Amino acid sequence: MPANLTDRSLRQQMWRPRSTPELLTGLGLALMLPWFAAWLSIDLAIFERFVGLPFLVATVAATLVGRLAASLVATLASGALIVTLEVLPAWRLSSPHPEDLIAVVIFVVVSLVVAYTLALKDAANDEAGEAAAEVESLARALAAERNTIRQIVHQMPNGVVVLDASGALSIQNERAHDLLMFRPEPGLRLESDDVPWTARDTDGRPREPASYPIIRSLRTGEVVIGEQMVIERSDGSTVTIEVDSAPIHANGDGTIIGAVASFQDVTERSEIQTSLIRATTRLRQLQAVTDATLTGLGFDDLAERLMQTLRRVLQTDSATLLLLDREGSTLVEHSTVGASTAGSQPSIPIGTGIAGKIASTVSPLVVDDLSTYEVARSWLTEMHSLMGVPLVFREQTRGVIHVASRTPRRFTSDDVEVLELAASRIASALERATLYDSRTAMSHALQRSLAPTSMPHIEGVDLAAAYLPFSEDDQIGGDFYAVFPHGDTSWGIVIGDVSGKGPDAAAIMGLAAHTVRATARYESRPAAVLLALNETLLGAEHVTAERFCTACEMRLRSDPRGLHVTVCLAGHPMPFVIRSDGSVQRVGEPGTLLGTFSDPTLHDVTTQLSDGDTIVAFTDGLVEQRRVGIDEGERRLAMLLSTCAGYSSEEIVRRIENELLPSVALDDDVAIVVIGRPR
């Protein structure tokens, strides 16, 4: 049996036609045509010698309509009629002839073979026709699908390029034509020299075709998402594109048969991003310069920090500040970072050299190659490129700032803008720094003038004092103390804390110290001295609006029994008394703050210091800090003082400084006065 018969569909078509009406028609013919063949064989003499021929024709006709099913019915019917009409009558009239039966069998076999052959041919023709129709249908569907895909690709807003397995362009849509300004010939390879555009990275580095995203997808199977390239087109214009690409795989085995890339014009977005990056960079650079100028540093420290900052943000090898001398005729190198300037550098007259030219023209200068200029400072010969701007404050040139690089460097307009803005801030900051140095010196001198340079010698009294400012800058604190004669043979000691800081505080301190000293000459009671100070502060509107203070005024009198100390408190912490046995007591009675009420409540309290006893007076900065409340601070101080029995006044001051005060910056000024009765 032919191999084709193993196909189930083909066997089914051999046995019966596809439609049921054809099958019924064939079966009907298979039953009717053998009777017609029998009539022909009896009535027509032509068939006397070929009795089976009409029946064979009948079988063929039934087979052509109803396939093997009709052929089998027609063959059986024909065989039955032949036996009935020809064989059996002959056997009744004469002796039987076996060859008649053999002839019937041969007829049946021949009929079946002919019918089988015809059915097989018809079925094969039908199968081939159906296959051809299916192939044609698939071809039409494929063509329609390819046409649809092409239409979709050509209508996409992004550029689309498709490569075949060899790297040749097979599809390029209209948007790709517009972006690339190029219509390729069929089969053009993207890696050939005939492609009229070139590509580079966004940082300007050229790209070889092998590095294009679509080529990488084709060669290695890489999937690329959002990679940017700059395309230089045939007319010299450029466009920045963002590319996505992927390989095209064959069904089943994963073989790469092509690659597709989609890309869009991101030129405007890229320019915006670049502008944002540049703006952000400039803001960071300016912020760094601003931060440096806002620090409370002296002139020299500030200049050093600013040069370091400029060198870092502009990524140069050196940064230099030159300032005009007092006469304003020459520039002097004040500070340089990033370069060795061993030895004294020469002064530069205005108008000569690079820096002198910048100062005289009051305009920026960019030098790409320093070897083409004559330089006055030897270390500049190590540099290749330089950028400098003048320092101008209130329309007056104060100096020059320049930065330099050892390697070739093209300074941009953005770099110049950053340096100019930095120079403006630096000029202002340096002006403030100069004022700061002057103000700080005056403030410290005023602070020193308000505190005793040394403690006076008082017979039978051990005195020590300390003042610790909370800030090292120009802010004058409000704490003060003073020692002075108290009218008769006694001595007066005052410790206090005025409101505010700075010049206002200095005014109140000077007023308080003068008033106390003057009043103590004729008033023996501490309360009377503080009442006079209160009246003075109330009438000091012309000095400052903030004119109140706390004070502890003590009068010291010695006799053979010991040292008598009369204490008066005006809103001030009560002093501690350390007895010789180590016990610690408070002394005094709280009173009213000075400079607030016209009739303050003030009390004189007298205590006696025997040999070995000590009294410690202090301002609230010693016991009141952010980390510790005033109650806890006083408790810690009392515990420390309980271990100081037998110590000298100076030793007690040192122990308070070393063991009680924090190592970090204070929250407030601290003044301490220690009065002891030696053993």
Image: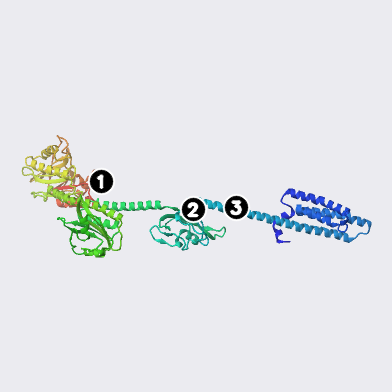
Disc 2 target residue: 174
* Residue 64 circle label: none
Please name the amino acid that badge 3 sits on: Ala
Between 319 and 407, the residue placed more toward the observer is 407
- Report helix, strand or loop for mark 2: helix
Between the residue at mark 3 and the residue at mark 2, the CA separation in whole angstroms equals: 24 Å
| Disc nearer the start of the sequence (1/2) | 2
Q: Is residue 294 left or right of residue 39?
A: left
Using the rendered image of the protein, determine whether residue 645 is visible from the camera's viewpoint. Answer: no
Q: Give percent across and percent down for residue 412.
A: 31, 56
Between the residue at mark 1 and the residue at mark 3, the CA separation in whole angstroms equals: 85 Å
Please name the residue shown 75% across and 56% down the image: 119
Please name the residue shown 75% across and 57% down the image: 118
Q: Is residue 406 left or right of residue 484?
A: right
Circle 2 residues within 10 Å: few <14, some 14–19, many ≥20: many
| Disc nearer the start of the sequence (1/3) | 3
Please name the amino acid that badge 1 sits on: Arg
The N terminus - image quarter: bottom right
Disc 1 target residue: 626
618 up-or-down from 162: above or below: above
Residue 92: quarter of image: bottom right
Q: Give percent across and percent down for residue 633.
A: 23, 46
Q: Between label 1 and label 2, give the one nearer the viewer.
A: 2
Between 163 and 458, the residue placed more toward the observer is 163
Disc 3 target residue: 141
- Report helix, strand or loop for mark 1: loop
Q: Say if mark 1 contacts mark 3, CB within 8 Å.
A: no
341 up-or-down from 481: above or below: below
Q: Give percent across and percent down for residue 167.
A: 50, 61
Please name the amino acid that badge 2 sits on: Glu
Q: Say if mark 3 contacts mark 2, CB within 8 Å.
A: no
- Report helix, strand or loop for mark 3: helix
